[in-house]
Image (tube, grey):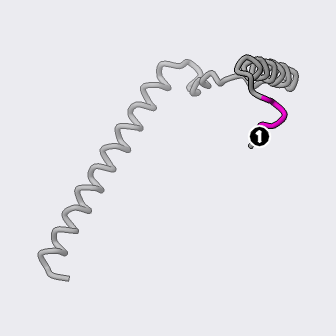
Amino acid sequence: MSEKASDSIETALEELYDERNRIEHAIAELERCLSNLRSDGKFKKTRSRRGWTAEARQAAAERMRNYWSQRHRANGEDIETQHVV
């Protein structure tokens, strides 16, 4: 590899290492600020979506079966001959 290409790669690497260090310091500073805002120093868990119970899934499935059955009947489609994938 030519000396010019080698120097260019080394310069790019140094710039990337510097940028990574700046980012790591910024992250550390933000985490420090956040922990100072909370009295216990722990990160608050974010709210997660509640999953459906088996009964709720079954009820929704039944509603959708009825819905599509009515739609097919309204369009005059024969439900028994349709191909289900």
The residue lying furthest to the front in this view is 76
- Magenta segment: does it hold 13? no
Above/below status of 77 relative to 10: above
Q: Which residues, given as a range, are shown in magenta?
A: 78-82
Classify residue 48 by image quadrant.
top right
The overriding secondary structure of the stretch rendered in magenta is loop
The residue lying furthest to the right in this view is 55
Provide the residue designation for mark 1.
84
Q: What amino acid is found at the position of numbered circle 1 in the picture?
A: Val
The residue lying furthest to the left in this view is 4
Q: Residue at x 56, y 18 (%)?
A: 39
Q: Position of residue 63 (x, y in %)?
A: 80, 18
Q: Nearer the viewer, residue 78 or 9?
A: 78
Q: Position of residue 65 (x, y in %)?
A: 80, 24
Q: Residue at x 48, y 19 (%)?
A: 37
Classify residue 23 by image quadrant.
top left
Q: Position of residue 47 (x, y in %)?
A: 62, 21
Q: Nearer the viewer, residue 72 or 66?
A: 72
Q: Nearer the viewer, residue 49 or 32?
A: 49
Q: Position of residue 40 (x, y in %)?
A: 59, 22
- Magenta segment: does it hold 81? yes
Q: Residue at x 75, y 27 (%)?
A: 77
